[in-house]
């Protein structure tokens, strides 16, 4: 089962912007949606991941999946 966090995060951001919400408020809400799915991720990571996804989405490219999945296992 694949994670739906990216789609849900982008959907929240787009919906709020469409309703006229300020960009910073929509971004904060999108980060909260991300944290719903991944509360284990550090705050700074969550903000950066969502920013990267939004940049890629707005550029018309695939936002991708979880960036930490490509990280080598350090255990």
Image (tube, rainbow, N blue to C red):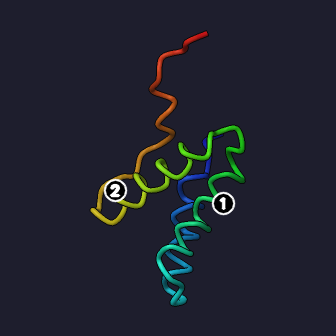
Ranked by sequence position, the earlier of labels 2 and 1 is 1
Give the answer, above or below, for where 65 lies relative to 17: above
Residue 44 image offset from top left, x and y in percent = 54, 45
Picture quarter with the C terminus: top right
Residue furthest out toward the top: 75
Give the answer, above or below, for where 48 lies relative to 15: above
**Left or right of 5 on screen, residue 66:** left
Single out the mark in the foreground, 2 or 1: 1
Asked which secondary structure carries label 1, the reply is helix
How would you rate the neighbour count of disc 2 (Cα within 10 Å): few for under 14, some for 14-19, many for 20 or more?
Answer: some
Please give the residue where the numbered disc 1 appears in the rendered image: 32
Please give the residue where the numbered disc 2 appears in the rendered image: 56
Residue 13 image offset from top left, x and y in percent = 53, 71
**Left or right of 59 on screen, residue 62:** right
At 41% across and 61% down in the image, what residue appears?
A: 54
**Residue 53 lies in quadrant:** bottom left
How would you rate the neighbour count of disc 1 (Cα within 10 Å): few for under 14, some for 14-19, many for 20 or more?
Answer: some
At 67% across and 51% down in the image, what residue appears?
A: 35
Asked which secondary structure carries label 2, the reply is helix
At 56% across and 48% down in the image, what residue appears?
A: 46
At 35% across and 59% down in the image, what residue appears?
A: 55
Give the answer, above or below, for where 41 lies relative to 47: above
């Amino acid at each position: 089962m694949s994670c739906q966090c990216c789609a849900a995060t982008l959907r929240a951001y787009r919906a709020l912007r469409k309703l006229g919400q300020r960009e910073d408020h929509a971004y904060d809400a999108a980060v909260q949606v991300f944290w719903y799915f991944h509360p284990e991720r550090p705050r700074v990571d969550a903000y950066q991941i969502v920013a990267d996804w939004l940049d890629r989405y707005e550029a018309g490219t695939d936002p991708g999946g979880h960036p930490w999945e490509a990280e080598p296992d350090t255990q």
